[in-house]
Image (spheres, rainbow, N blue to C red):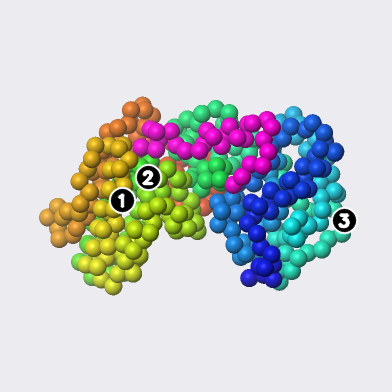
Amino acid sequence: MTNSDSRFLPGLELSRALYEEAVRPILREAFPGLRHAAARIGGGSEVLGFDTPRSADHEWGPRLELFLTPEDRAEHGARLHDVLAHRLPKHVRGWPTHFQESGNPLDPVGRMQATDGPVNHRVDLHNVDEWAAAHLGLHAADAEPSVNEWLAMPQQRLAETTGGMVFHDEPGTLTALRRTLAWYPDQVWRYVLACQWQRISQEEAFVGRCAESGDDIGSAVVAGRLVRDLMRLCLLLDRRYVPYSKWLGSSFGRLPVADSLTPSLRGALTAPDHPTREKHLCDAYEAVATLHNATGLTALLDPTRRPYHSRPFLVLHAERFAQALARTLTHPALRERPLVGGVDQWSDSTDLLRQPRAVRAAVDAPQ
């Protein structure tokens, strides 16, 4: 930890202070009447509410996104950045506004920096359309995304867009974008849920088959994958975007079901043998199947464990839930689409998911 631990405060609070105590007064004086939005969204643990003192060692501090109209950004952007560099205070709430090239507001041993001259600040200037295109791959921020656009947006990016905090939005375009993306349209939600159940169905019998073949470590690895998919499914059932792996457990822990389901999930992960592993997984399957039934998205399905055909393994047969959801799809772009899901249901490559154009091309490819 750094020696700043004692003065740590949540990053969103720090960003609000940066705007209200420093940036907004400068805008009022130097750019009176400039219509803008101010927010802390995008990348960063603080946007999802998971920042800790450890976060202060990289890309964390008094940060802000300012959104201008395209015309105002073209006319005032360079001068605005320069004015802020020369007029921002050196610290906000005890934290330096000057960032090193590494993106760290502290020096390598965690001490507060001092700087002479202009501040290398992290008040980033955008317009909403360009930000939505770069961050999400959207063609137009003010239009309802197409089915393919929804499926091409990684849930981590959707969480970064709809999370965080907006401190001011006179134009209203950023707020409108966040409202549009707050959650999937009903048909897309049903499709993504069906695909998540389908993932589980593909591997639930492998826990037993690996063990039967003498591959206990393989059985444990498959169990871990199933636990991950069940956690992701629980988030989707609760209408919450699934973050990437670093924050999956933290996000799951905030769900109402987490306290009751965690013992089964942990038991599956730590089980010393296949029978114990299978019991815990089946307990979890039944709990999540009951959650599914409570949504009313399909007719009630039997949530109990059952044999895997003639083999001596107990499973849920999760494809029953995938197929039931698929039968509720009426949107022509989804009705005949294979149950492969959104981009982060078939790829967890960070390098791919950070490239909106590449993701969109993959999603748009013929199925």
Secondary structure type for disc 2 = helix
Return the residue at label 3: 117
Q: Is residue 259 visible?
A: yes
Which residue is drawn at the image coordinates 83% and 61% (left, top)? 115
Q: Is residue 59 visible?
A: no
Give the mark nearest the N terminus, 2 or 3. Answer: 3
Q: Looking at the rendering, which quadrant does residue 364 occupy? A: top left
2 or 3: mark nearer the eye: 2
Return the residue at label 2: 237
Return the residue at label 1: 288
Q: Are circles 2 and 3 on residues that touch, CB within 8 Å? A: no
* Residue 6, numbered circle: none
Image quadrant where one finds the C terminus: top left
Vertical relation: 8 (above or below) 303: below
Q: How many other residues sit within 10 Å of disc 1, few (<14), some (14-19) or many (≥20)?
A: many
From mark 3 to mark 1, how far is it between C-alphas?
A: 57 Å
